[in-house]
Amino acid sequence: MALSETFVDQHIAYWSTQLGAGNHPYRKHWPSRLFHHCPLDTAVAIINDGHLRARDDPQRLILQDVAAGGVIDNRQEAHGRVRLYFRPRNPTQFHIEGIRKDADCNYGTNAHAPVLVMFVLDAKRVLTRADILFSDQNMQNLNAATGNDEAFFANIPFLSVFHEGGIAGDHSIIAHRCAEVLPATPLPIADVLSSILFRSEPERDTFLYKLGEAAPRWQPFCYVSEELKVFDKRFAFVADIDLSREGVSFRLNHRHDLQNISIVIQGYNEQNQICVDFRNEDFQTHNQAGGRWIHRVALEPSNYLVKVQIDNHLAYEAFIRLDDSLF
């Protein structure tokens, strides 16, 4: 049973006002949107397919399953539906976002997304669709309740769903942060997409590079923005990268614990010859230059394919054009 447009408008208006007036006012942007996070290659597959699909959808292409082993098998009810969240940075995302060392992976080394992509959807377009279902917490939780009408939706504890900060011992807040919206599968992405968000421009450029010929159509949807604060950014990633005649300059996001990382940077010219090959197994991401580093190597003007690996995971891959300078 779909929610009425009037009901959804009232929900969005009320919570946008409430969240904008309190602490963490960036939350005012959340009620008008829904969120779906996934690893880089899965995001590319979603765009190429044109749909978000349920786990049990026979046409779903599974490139990397980041679901926590054991947890995903607790319940099967949601496996036949697309899974969206009312908010970003929920507990599920917290456990998978970012390039992690094995010791950082709470649910197994495969249960993390080195480059996490956030699909931001228009809440009204989704919530008013036919055959919609909602939960008051994560559907893998045996205590999660579901419903499909306005009465159930109105009783979802959105104060907890949108909560930020300490929980003062109330662990129900953590559970409600994972409340879900469960449309029927498949969900056509073009009908509901608002934007695709990334942690950095290099990660956005990697996504567009992997889209290939489809990139120009989707580039207008791709943003790097802090307005909604959708990422945790607790682990290393490529914050920016560029080429000059002197070499490769780059800056990495620091790990939350400032641990060193392993890094490989390679660059190939238009003849597919390797021109950059920088490797460091114990690299320090922070320094007195604001974390900016340069690997010095003489480069001539060309179009270079540059690849970066951090802790043995792809962190960046795209072309960078080095033009001839007039100075």
Image (cartoon, rainbow, N blue to C red):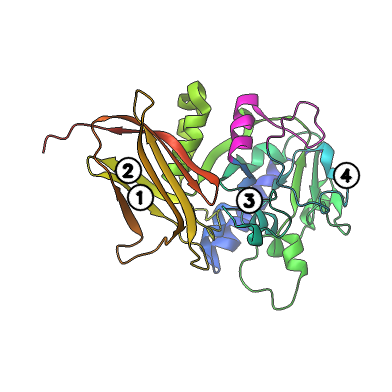
Please tell me the numbered disc located at residue 250.
1
Q: Which mark is residue 242?
A: 2
Please count the marks in the image.
Answer: 4
Circle nearer the viewer, 3 or 1: 1
* Residue 257 spot, x, y in % from top left: 52, 68
Identify the image quadrant of residue 169: bottom right
- Give the number of the disc on residue 77: 4
The residue at which mark 3 appears reads as: 12
Residue placed most toward the observer, 180 or 32: 180
Say which amino acid is labelled 4: Glu
Amino acid type indicated by mark 2: Asp
Instruction: Classify mark 2: residues with Cα within 10 Å, few (<14), some (14-19) or many (20+).
Output: some
* N-terminal label among 4 and 1: 4
Q: Amino acid at mark 3?
A: Ile
**Disc on the earlier residue, 4 or 2:** 4
Q: Nearer the viewer, mark 4 or mark 2?
A: 2
